[in-house]
Amino acid sequence: MALETAGPLAGTDPAAHGPGHLTPGDRAGLLRSMLLMRSVEERAMNLYRQGKVPGSFYDGFGQEAVSVGAAWALAATDRLCILHRDLGAHLVRGVPPARILGQYMGRDGGITRGRDGNVHFGDHTRGCVGMVSMLPDMMLVATGMAMGFKLRHQDRVALTFFGDGSTSRGDFHEALNWASVQRLPVIFVLENNQYAYSTPLAAQFVVDPIARADAYGMPGVRVDGNDAEEVFEAVHAARERALVGAGPTLIEAVTMRMHGHAAHDDMKYVPPAQLEEWRAKDPIDRQAARVARDGVDVDALREEVRALVDAATQEALAMPMPDPATAHHGAFHDPADGEVVLADGGEAPWSGFAAAGGAG
Amino acid sequence: MATMTYLQAISDGMREEMRRDERVFVMGEDIGAFGGAFKVTDGFLDEFGADRVMDTPLAESAIIGTACGAAYVGLRPICEMQFADFISCGFDQLVNVAGKMHYRQGLPTNITVRLPSGGGFSGGPFHSSNPEAWFMHAPGLKVVAPSTAEDAKGLLIAAVRDPNPVVFMEHKHLYRRVKGEVPAGTYETPLTARIAREGSDLTVIAYGAMVHTALEATADLDGASVEVLDLRSLVPLDEEAILASVRRTSKVLIVDEANQMCAAGAQVAAVIAEHAFEHLDGPVRRVATPDVPIAFSPPLEQALLPGVDRIKEAARELLDY
Ligand SMILES: Cc1ncc(C[n+]2csc(CCOP(=O)(O)OP(=O)(O)O)c2C)c(N)n1
């Protein structure tokens, strides 16, 4: 495993990573999920340009390896708070693309039934809590889920993502400190995509956040965020560590936001050379090359994903808008509707869980 | 039945609920070995152990945020703020995570947040406030404010069992001053208003500590028959009980210990203006704390907090109207 603490970026030669814990089926699965994420987001951007997505549209183009690689390492019994560049994690958990496109378009069939937009959703039937916009609030929610696991002596972990800009807020500190004091089974995945909206790293912090992990008493692991397998291995190792009671891990996935902050952002503040440099490190191209070497027909995979997203688009476009008469419903939960907590219904596709005879 | 102080009743409610339901636990600053700044959890550590009587870092955002997370995986945390004032540091998690989660995601946030509130003993600008209106304004949060020992226990238990986030306003000045008969075992007090004293000439509407001040101020107003309505719950607000009382008496005085601007009483006044206008025989009057921080020095603090004299004066004016 090419893991380093507070070190430089790991190398990009796939051969250097070895077989690790992934089978050829996993490697193709990672590629498929990344293709699906890119395809769903490209489709959503088109729908946005056609005026079918209200508000703005936020995507994770170029960052697909982070959410897909991380979610791939989690069991169905684990819990996630997924952030706005991390659509791949929802897809790995098995959220149907039609419901995601419906979500973007504010349809009744979207995950939040039109109550919230963008990637501000979490399918609680698949063990996910929908993010709030305030960054990085979900670090504390994930910490609390891990606290619940520890209090109940359960072998489960919680994971959340957050960006480089989010490290400037106090909740970043409160979460790392609390998780470490209580030695909680939580994995923090810092997605360093070089910019927070238009703000570059140098205007955000002086000491790199990963270097601060040590100060909180937890390992800080920097990985190439454009390598899904490397992200997987780091999260897998952090999960193993958490499950033996050794506490939290801070992982920094170094990547690049290849699109604007949102659809309206022309990114004029990003030097073109920087984009060119990162375009050459595209995470999907990299995984596709590996998978092709394993003998998989990547073109066929792309075709399958495209057809799936075509069908999902039609399904989403057929979803009705929510009934305005219900707009004022649902601020409170009615006890008569029974207890609702996060459920285990999420998919956990990593082959290692099947080999272990279940959800790990 | 046993006679208990308001504080003992809150403790009793938590203790009974923790014995009954292993999902319930308490978390906060200095609540374990020390038993909490006001000793509400005194003895809990011995009975329930450190896991369920969790001393936390000094981090209010984290207290609320981690409580939300624990609730999502099936636990029922009760968070103690050392003083209500410090909830400002946990405001975002309460309002944006807990308050908005169910509407957006269909996922309830079963947390109870206890806020020791109120002034009257030189707590000064940072240990005396009554921030309930902030949370009334935030969708998805329930807000309760008991005035008696019996209701303190019953509302605490109702809050813990409610699948939604409940802000539990416990008035510090009542902790040891108010005593009453409290039923044994567990029971839930409904989130509705209660008539603290029946009357026919004037209704005084209050909650928390002001119920007692209102009762004292109107006990003997030259023979006038004054009804005192104890709201008990601010969200949901028992509009029916408010309107029924106003229809009976036709005159109404609303008392808030909170700062006047947009306080709970302002909402009560709006409800009355909208739905009981024809029943009124006089203007809706309010007595509240002026819009300044609560001062430290006793004569200044007493000048700010609504007291018996100000309530008497306003009540007399209305009765004479
Ligand atoms: C507390 C807070 N302030 C401001 C915003 C508005 N905002 C949305 S995303 C964003 C940039 C976030 O940067 P980063 O954390 O690096 O994540 P990225 O979007 O780059 O993935 C800002 C400022 C917000 N969501 N939350």
Image (tube, rainbow, N blue to C red):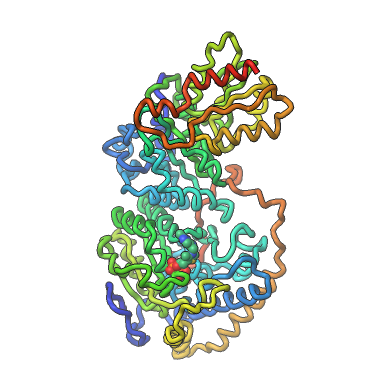
Q: Quadrant of residue A228?
A: bottom left
Query: Which residue does the image show at 44% across and 47% down from the upper left?
Result: B75
In the depicted structure, whether residue B213 falls above or below residue A128: above
Please tell me how many numbered marks the rendered image carries. 0
Q: Is residue A77 visible?
A: no
The quarter of the image holding the C terminus of chain B is top right
Which of the pair A290/B111 is nearer the observer? B111
User: Residue B317 at what x, y percent from top left?
Assistant: 60, 18
In the depicted structure, whether residue B176 falls above or below residue A338: above
User: Residue A46 at what x, y percent from top left?
Assistant: 64, 77
Which of the pair B15/B133 is nearer the observer? B133
Query: Which residue does the image show at 31% across and 44% down from the upper left?
Result: B55
In the depicted structure, whether residue A277 falls above or below residue B78: below
Q: Quadrant of residue A157?
A: bottom left
The quarter of the image holding the N terminus of chain B is top left
Query: Which residue does the image show at 46% across and 29% down from the upper left?
Result: B152
